[in-house]
Image (cartoon, grey):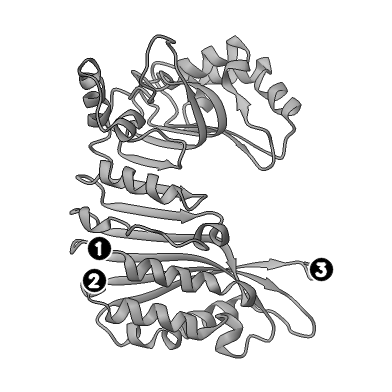
Amino acid sequence: MPSVLYHVRSFGLLMNGSTMFETYAILGNDCLVDILRSLHARSYGILGLALCIQGPSIPINLLDLATNFRSAFQNLLHSPFLTTLCLQNIFGVPDTLIRWTSLKHLHFHFVELVRYRVDYDPLWILPPNAQIESLDIDFTFPFPPREVLETGGIVQDDMEAVSHFCNSFSGVTDLKYSIYHSSDFRLFCDVVLGLSSSLTTIELELSDTGRVLNRHIPWPLPFHRLPLLRSLTIRLRSLISIETCGLLRHLSTILKDCSIPPSLQTIDFALELRSQAQWLKLCDFFPQPSLWAVLDNILATHPQFAAIQSVYFNLQYRTLNEEPWAFDEGVFVARCATLVKELFPLLADSKTKLGAIVSVLSLPRDI
């Protein structure tokens, strides 16, 4: 058993679609507790740990889980080897969960904290010993401390605690932030400004793009205040099709209104598209080419993007394989990659490097 565990570098519990009863039954299983205990050893250990409840499942309350599971889970978090923790769809998480750990990479989505001490007013997650290097978070993550944002300051007794908290995040270089509502943009801006002295990479994921982008964003994204920012990724999770091309118009508005620092070198767009046969014309691959042309014009001619060295499009297609059209994925991908230069002629003729990564997910005909 130890020889096998020596080679285990990450351990994840990912439950998708389980009922609440099934989820609690799995997490309360004694065999699972034994596995967690076995993964915590002095001479070796895992680097990553994940507890993610996905799909339509009701969030679990960590405090409702069996004591032996919570104890084994907490002990594993204090392994000196563990540097990555992923939590999703969990509430009742003590604000002391990661205190005195060696964690450097946090992935927290829909995680609700509770105060470990009822007489302790500030509520933020007490930081680990190590400097945090990367964050993958959403609006539920309490950074910067809400008390600072809401009151404009804190009482003197809490200054040292807040200073230690902020210092633990002063080395974050990579940030991925998921937007679910238009109001999340304001929280995203607060996080970005709180990490402004260290961020080099940002990925902004718009999870429900239609709802998020249908409202005007009343403030510009403060990328210009990030002196070290080198790479920016914008990921749209809504499917782009003939019916939803308006998403491209909103994306153009975001780009037009944002200011970026001279340090920014690369912009990536991760997009999901739907296509159907015949796959003969440009519009079969890229619905409403005129809207894509607006993106081309902004990226190639607006002064704030003049120093950009590379623009990449990561395109994931959903295709309907309809008879009598025989679908050849290799031909499709090659054709699509070639058409990118035709779709973005201004970028293609500029000094900016233009690239595309194309992948395909074939859908059943009855969708």
Q: Quadrant of the C terminus?
A: bottom right
Q: Is residue 43 above or below residue 275?
A: above
Label 2 residue SS: helix
- Where does label 1 land, which residue? 260
Q: Quadrant of the N terminus?
A: top right
What's the CA distance linking mark 3 and mark 2? 45 Å
Residue located 48% across and 17% down the image: 74
Q: Position of residue 300 (x, y in %)?
A: 30, 80
Foreground pick, 124 / 273: 124
Q: Is residue 19 above or below residue 305?
A: above
**Nearest to N terminus: mark 3 or mark 1:** 1
Label 3 residue SS: loop
Residue type pointed to by label 1: Ile
Q: Position of residue 270 (x, y in %)?
A: 47, 64
**Nearest to N terminus: mark 2 or mark 1:** 1
Residue located 22% across and 15% down the image: 157
Task: Give the class, few, some or many, for how many residues have Cα within 10 Å of label 3's Cα (few <14, many ≥20).
Answer: few
Residue type pointed to by label 2: Gln
Tell me which corner region of the image, top left, top right, bottom left or bottom right, holds residue 237: bottom right
**Nearest to N terminus: mark 3 or mark 2:** 2
Badge number at residue 366: 3
Foreground pick, 45 / 269: 269
What's the CA distance linking mark 2 and mark 1? 6 Å
Q: Residue furthest bottom?
A: 281
Comparing labels 3 and 2, the label whose residue is closer to the camera: 2
Residue located 35% across and 21% down the image: 122
Tag 2 and tag 1, C-beta contact below 8 Å? yes
Task: Give the class, few, some or many, for how many residues have Cα within 10 Å of label 1's Cα (few <14, many ≥20).
Answer: many
